[in-house]
Amino acid sequence: MWTPIKTTRSLLIAEAWKELFEEEGIPCRLHWPNPLLRADDDATCYVLVPNDRLHVAERTLRDA
């Protein structure tokens, strides 16, 4: 199961967080609350990580 770790208002920022987590070995997905706005660069986007890696992602956030 996936859980949100960050909420962004920009696809660019969401992709940056995704890249950071993946560099740390944490699988990551992006999710849009409204899939119709997926192409909108300024749409709200959630950065998701697996539940079993949440503690590692939170540590990465503290260290960033």
Image (cartoon, rainbow, N blue to C red):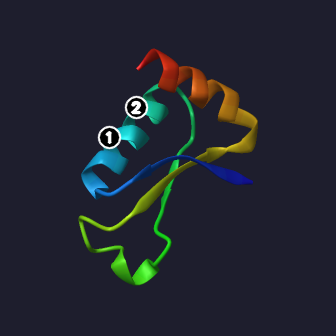
Q: Which residue shows up at 39% across the image and 84% down it?
A: 36
Label 1 neighbourhood size at 10 Å, few (<14), some (14-19), many (20+)? Answer: few
Q: CA distance from mark 1 to mark 2?
A: 6 Å
Looking at the picture, does residue 56 appear above or below residue 13? above
Residue 8 screen position, x and y as percent: 38, 52
Residue 31 screen position, x and y as percent: 50, 63
For this view, does 2 lie left or right of residue 18? right
SS label for mark 1: helix
Residue indicated by mark 2 = 20
Residue indicated by mark 1 = 16
Q: Quadrant of residue 40?
A: bottom left
For this view, does 58 lie left or right of residue 35? right
Query: What type is the residue that disc 1 sits on?
Result: Ala
Instruction: Identify the disc placed on residue 51.
Output: none
Residue 30 screen position, x and y as percent: 47, 57
Q: Which residue shows up at 25% across the image and 51% down it?
A: 12
Query: What type is the residue that disc 2 sits on?
Result: Leu
Of residues 8 and 57, the one nearer the viewer is 8
Q: Which residue shows up at 73% across the image and 43% down it?
A: 51
Looking at the picture, does residue 31 appear above or below residue 63? below
